[in-house]
Image (cartoon, rainbow, N blue to C red):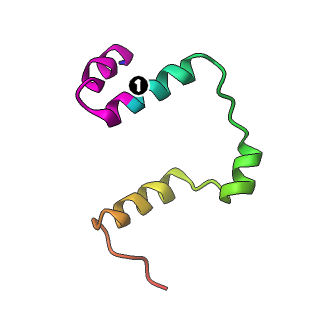
């Protein structure tokens, strides 16, 4: 996948950025701190909540009532 991102990244900047991010993750230097993330960004949404928000933001489902 990284090789494919490198090739496509030569013509698409967003793909190049994605490839750079993946290469960084592979170095092992990235360490997530879920406690700190929840302090900064609030509670982590469930997968169902995240997908629901993505679909609503894309205009593919109605806004929730209430």
The answer to if 51 sits in the magenta stretch is: no
47 relative to 59 in the view: left or right:
right
Residue 22 vertical position relative to residue 61 in the rendered view, above or below? above
**Residue at x-position 33% and y-position 22%:** 5
Where in the figure is residue 23, as x and y percent of width and height?
Answer: 49, 20
Please give the count of numbered marks on the rendered protein. Answer: 1
Residue that mark 1 sits on: 19
Residue situated in front as seen by the camera: 44 or 8: 8
Residue situated in front as seen by the camera: 54 or 19: 19
Residue situated in front as seen by the camera: 53 or 12: 12
**Residue at x-position 27% and y-position 18%:** 7
**Residue at x-position 41% and y-position 31%:** 18
Q: Quadrant of residue 14?
A: top left
Mark 1 burial class by Cα count in 10 Å: few <14, some 14-19, many 20+ = many
Q: Residue furthest left?
A: 11
Residue 30 vertical position relative to residue 53 in the rendered view, above or below? above
Where in the figure is residue 40, as x and y percent of width and height?
Answer: 71, 55
The answer to if 15 sits in the magenta stretch is: yes
Residue range highlighted in magenta: 2-16
Quadrant of the drawing holding the N terminus: top left
Q: Quadrant of residue 61?
A: bottom left
**Residue at x-position 43% and y-position 62%:** 53
């Amino acid at each position: 996948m990284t090789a494919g991102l490198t090739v496509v990244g030569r013509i698409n900047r967003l793909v190049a950025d994605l490839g750079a991010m993946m290469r960084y993750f592979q170095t092992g230097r990235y360490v997530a701190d879920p406690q700190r993330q929840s302090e900064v960004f609030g509670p982590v949404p469930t997968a169902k909540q995240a997908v629901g928000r993505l679909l609503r933001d894309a205009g593919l489902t109605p806004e929730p009532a209430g």
